[in-house]
Amino acid sequence: MNNNVVNASRPSLKSALAKWVYIAIVFLIIFPFDRFGLPAITAPIALFIGLLFAFIFPMPFPKFNKKGSKYLLQASVVGLGFGMSVTEALKSGGSGMMFTIVSVFSVMVFGVLIGYWLHLNRKTSYLISAGTAICGGSAIAAVGPVLRANDEEMAVSLGVIFILNAIALFIFPPMGKAFDMTDQQFGTWAAIAIHDTSSVVGAGDAFSASACEIATVIKCTRALWIIPLALVTMFLFRDKNSAKISIPWFILLFVVAMIVNTYLGLPQGVSEAIVYVAKKLLVVTLFFIGASLSLATVKKVGVRPLVLAVLLWIVIGVSSFAVVMLTL
């Protein structure tokens, strides 16, 4: 009887501990250690801590964690806009526009064909291709309802993209430095070859502040392709009951923030403070994303979806690397 009571209490004790550990980690991430000359928690470290948390503890705040990662990412991207110039943004975004068009189209076609070859579910192949071609989880979340994908198809697609996102944040900055890439080259490459905006901004920031700006602008420009892709998806999988298209409005607010910073002459101290807070929010976002990637999610992905995602990632990663090294 006593053994049963002890065993029954263990899950609740672990859940209670998970809540306090989760809150403590968020506090440590937010705390401005760098203001006191101490090393602050960076984006890759936050993601790694999140992954460790997910593998050790049950998620104590699943709804908050899911919504927090979504809205904090959007807020951080908008905040970063207050530290950027419209003129520089147009120059950076324009340089990657043509390759963006070609790569989005190519990845979607290759993804569908490889998925067919792997005998993978049609909708799952399409979702993974959309996430690789444009902006990871955001593209999948936008296209999924239009595609009328079920929960399992959405979970598998998001899971495989999140796994590769986590890997990208760790391997891209060292690779960029190993190949002696310039800020322009790395920012462009990261924006095209890394799936989610969160990991793109995190990898760019780990490389340099300038690379982060370039990567953010190009990725946000690329994210706008969600709208035409959703329209094409509605045509290909047309259904009178199809859901409405989810438009990434935060991208427009990001543009507004750049315009305000460029033409309204914000005091330097104000813009620097906003950017500082935005970067803190991004680090918290990456912890949330890592904490949501449990072992159950990894197991649910399966081999074939992961093979498709890795093959597409190799295609977009190698081709974009070659283009930026030869043209920029």
Image (spheres, grey):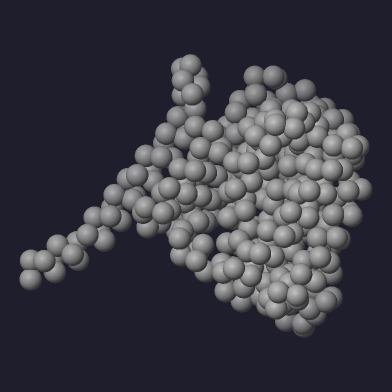
Residue 275 pos. (x, y %):
64, 30
Query: Residue 7 occupies which quadrant of the picture?
Result: bottom left
- Residue 78 in view, yes or no: yes
Report which quarter residue 131 is drawn in. bottom right
Q: Is residue 160 left or right of residue 268?
A: left
Percent x, y of residue 230:
79, 66
In the picture shown, does residue 5 fall above or below 175?
below
Residue 292 falls left or right of residue 199: left
Foreground residue among 275 and 128: 128
Decide if residue 66 is on the left or right side of residue 192.
left
Quarter of the figure that contains the C terminus: top right
In screen coordinates, is 50 left or right of 3?
right
- Please, which residue is most extreme toward the left here? 1
In the orientation shown, which residue stands out farthest toward the bottom? 240
* Furthest residue in direction front, as rendered: 178
At horizontal 34% and vertical 50% (from top left) the residue drawn is 19
Residue 212 in sight: no
What residue appears at the point 47 percent right and 46 percent down from the top-left corner? 50
Q: Position of residue 246 (x, y in %)?
A: 72, 62
Point out the image quarter for the N terminus.
bottom left
Q: Residue at x 81, y 60 (%)?
A: 107
Give me the residue at 75% from left, 76% from top. Answer: 116
